[in-house]
Each structure stands twice: as structure tokens, then as C-alpha cells.
Amino acid sequence: MSKKKPEDTAKEIGDYLVENTDSVAKYNVVKGFLNLSIASSAWIGLLNTIHADEHFGEKTATDVSPLVMIEYSSPNTNKPLHLGHVRNNLLGWSLAQIMAANGNKVVKTNIVNDRGIHICKSMLAWQKWGNGETPETSGKKGDHLIGDYYVAFDKHYREEVKSLKNQYMSEGMDEETAEKRAKDDAPLIKEAHEMLVKWEQGDKEVRSLWEKMNSWVYAGFDETYHALGVSFDKIYYESETYLEGKAKVEEGLERGLFFRKEDNSVWADLTNDGLDQKLLLRSDGTSVYMTQDIGTAQMRFKDYPIDKMIYVVGNEQNYHFQVLSILLDRLGFKWGKELVHFSYGMVELPNGKMKSREGTVVDADDLIATMITDARQMSEDKVNKLTDISEEEKNEIARIVGMGALKYFILKVDARKNMLFNPEESIDFNGNTGPFIQYTHARIRSILRKAEAEGFIIPQTLETDMPVNAKETDLIQKLNEYGAAVEQAGQNYSPSGIANYCYELTKQFNQFYHDFSILNADSKEEKTVRLVLAANVAKVIKNGMRLLGIEVPERM
């Protein structure tokens, strides 16, 4: 304690800082509060630091960095990807980029649900009504073709159920019992179950059909993934992992971790963890989803030295992953207890929910095509102002803007919340949208090209005596916050944090650009500082949007 008046203490500190540091230019004391004015040289020094690093604010993985595995997508092979998958894939991809930018080694994985009764439904429908139809003969993507047969199965199945239900009710059965029995007795569902048994037994004909139809689906998925700009380092298939899971459960049974009931089913007792008992193997020895997830974990642990496992799965599976974490920990997976369920809310369109089996699903491919078409129409006036632009480049700009609009609109929302995706709002060139941020980047790149055409060369380092005004120092501070935004997004698993930062930076730059000229600045020094500042705003916008999986065009 100084034992002096606050004003005197503040003055002593201020004098010391002015005399002994380069960062403080001057100070004043108001009612005991010490107010410091940071020297222009300090702001220029900070801008030089940002300018020198192409990936300022991001970290690079080293040999000793932790390995984070992220699972996302998780499609079924009986239908094409839909709007819900779009949110899942975009969140998973962005999270992978954010974790990498925080210095982690990242492995992106996908688990494909390629076995089960739902797959057999599509196979059986194709056998009955397909007439040998293929993606080539139909002109449809493979996943769409198989999805059509899944819908066809459900249509015929419901007709059979309705007919049987009416028959049973006419025989005096009550409605509820009649419907339940009709669902079990319908010939189609019985045939599908028979096909599943044959698949389990390795029937050559069934397995051959299964492999052929799945190959069509995978080719279709790959097209959609490419359009979304996502990919995977490793893909696992439940047809391979379920046997591994059964073996792991049997091992746990031998170790006394699980127990067998009289009907031969295997269970885990989770009552000491405040939960209930969980089925792991049915009485006939067949596996459940939990068993398959255990098997997938076992295979992944063999393949990679995982330090953290993140599952990107909707919030309807919260309980499932709570149980999975406990079971994996019991079985000895070092990351089991700490596994992260990146739980996200559902996404809907203004006209309501999606219903896959009725064929009214919001198809991912249709959504992507619509976004690109809408972007082309919305940006037509802006693009037409560009000279020497080919039709091919116009189409590429439309693709970048359309996909940017889709991705940003979805990723800017807190992942934990349900959301309403509005395509029209997403392609607005004003407000908190992807195109607004993309357009600002393109505007800055245009400014830099004009400066270059004038013969201006942006220096690698600014002289520390260059002038900066208050709005410029505010922008430098905002740029400097990028590293903190990346770190916080990694800690909170929050792509929306990066989206919000990019929007705030863009908004602040546009206000600065409105207030101050860059190319017609009053002096060469001011012009130089502003061009370096603008170049770094464009750089950080590009890097931040890259963490969201969003491209930014050079011109719009």
C-alpha cells in the first residue's frame, strides 16, 4: 500500500509508465482513476505482429498435441441426406477446423448405419418393384433411388396394415390390438425380417444385393459431401463394428461388468449411476445400437491414440451418450468418461418438420441447388457490374455465395438450440449473413487490387511512427481479439462464436470504411496504414470463415 492519496499514487504510476515504457504516450488522473493513452507506436507494433502472421490467432499442432477424434454425419444407407444431416455435417466440419486451429491433431470420422431392418426394407422394395432399375438407367443419384424404394416400401406396408387392421376389427378385435397385430402380421414386414436374418447368416444373394445397393448410396453421398465441402479421414461401417461390439460386451460379461438375464439377454446395471438397466444384447444374441457404438469405439481405439472423442449427434440422443460414456469408462477406454456429446437442436424450414418415410423430407441436394440458384439471382446486379467475367466465374461466385449463405445461417445459431432455417433471409447482402461478410471481403480485395494497379506496394512492416486514429486502433484491437475468439470457440465447442466474431469484425470495418477513405487518404502514411489494416481484416475474415467451412470470393 502506498499510504498516499489516490490521486498522488495514480500520478506516480503514470509518470513511471510514460518514462519507462514505449506503450504509454500520456495519462491523466480523474478522481483517483488513472487513464492511460496508448502510444501510436504500440498500436502499429501490434498491427505489425498481426500482419506478419498469415494465420494470426491460430495454433499449429505438434507431435505432442492431443489427438481429438470427431464423429459426424452418421447417415443411414436407406435414404439420401436431408436438412438435419446438413446441420450435422456443417457443425462437425467446423468443429474439426476450430479444434485444429487450437493446436490439436484432429481425425474426422463417419459411422455409416449400413445394416438393419431399415436397409432390408429398401432392398425388398427394389426386388419387388425395381425391374432392375439402376442410377444409370433412372438418371437419379444412387441415394435418391434407394430412398424412393424406402418410401415405396412404407407406402405398401401401410396399405397392408390398414387392410389387416380392418379385417381384424371386423372379427371383433379392438382397434388398438388390431393395429398392433396388423403391423406385426403384414407380409411385407415379415419378408423384410426374413431378409435381415439371411443377411445376418451371410446369405450370398442377399449380401450381393446389399453391397450393390449400398455402393449406389455411397456414390450419391460422396456427391453431397463434396457439394457441402466436407470430408472424412476415416469411415466406419456398422456392418463391421457390430461384431466387435458383441465381442466387447461378452468380454465385459466375463469380467463381471454386465449380467445375463434368464432369457439369455445381456444387460448393464447403471442404477448406481442414477440410471436404469441397459440392454446390450438381445435374447437371440443380436446387437443393439449401444453394442454397435461400443464396437465402433473399440475399432477406433485400435486405429488411433485418441485423447478426446467428440460425437456430433442430435439432442434426442442425450441419454444414449450419457449411458455410452459410463459403459466405455467401465470397459477401460481412457477417454470414455470424458467423451463429449456435441448435442445440437433440430433444424426446420418455415413450413414445418420433415418426415422421411412419407417422402416429404427436405432433401440436402435440393436445398443446395436452390441456395445456389437463389444466390445467382440475388447477386445478378452486383456480378453484372464486374467487367471481363466469364459465365463460369459467375457460376462459381453463385456457388460460393449460396453455400456461404446456407452454412453461415446454420452455424451462427447456438448449436444447442432448435432453429428455423429461412433460405430467403440467409441470402441477404445486409445484416448478419454470410453474403454480407463475403461481400465485405470482396470489397477489400477490390481496394487492394486498385492500390496495386496504382503501383502501391504494401510493406511487410510499418514504421512505428505511422499515425493511427481512434477508429483504426479500435479495428486493430478487434483483429487482436481473433485469437481469443478461436480459443473460446474451442473450449466451448462453439462454431457460432467464430461466426459472431466474423460478423462483428465485418460490421466494424464497414463503419470505418464509411467514415474514412482508404485510397484517397490525406497522406501517404495514412493510406499505407489503412491498406495494411484492410488487408489484415480481409485475412482474418477469410481465416475465420474458413473455420466455418465457408469460402470467400475475391470479387462479387
Image (cartoon, rainbow, N blue to C red):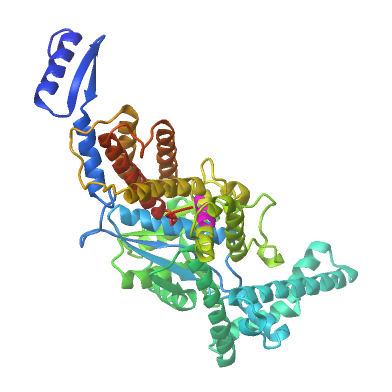
Q: Residue furthest left?
A: 20
Residue 168 x %, y %: 85, 71
Looking at the image, residue 174 sits to the left or right of residue 242; the answer is: right
Q: Is residue 198 above or below residue 149?
A: below
Helix, strand or loop for the magenta stretch, by majority: helix
**Considering depth in this image, is 64 or 116 the residue closer to the camera?**
64
Pick the quarter of the image with the N terminus: top left
Task: Return the residue nearer the eye: 455 or 268.
Answer: 455
Name which residue lies at 51% across and 64% down. Answer: 390
Quarter of the image where one finds residue 372:
bottom right
Q: Nearer the viewer, residue 31 or 18?
A: 18
Q: Quadrant of residue 361?
A: bottom right
- Residue occupying the point 25% across, 46% down: 51
The magenta region covers 401-408
Tell whether position 437 is magenta: no
Residue 517 x, y percent position in the rendering: 38, 35
344 vs 422, left or right, is left
- Residue 61 locus on image (x, y percent): 25, 58
Asked whether residue 405 is drawn in magenta, I would say: yes
Can residue 88 be seen in the rendering of this structure?
Answer: yes
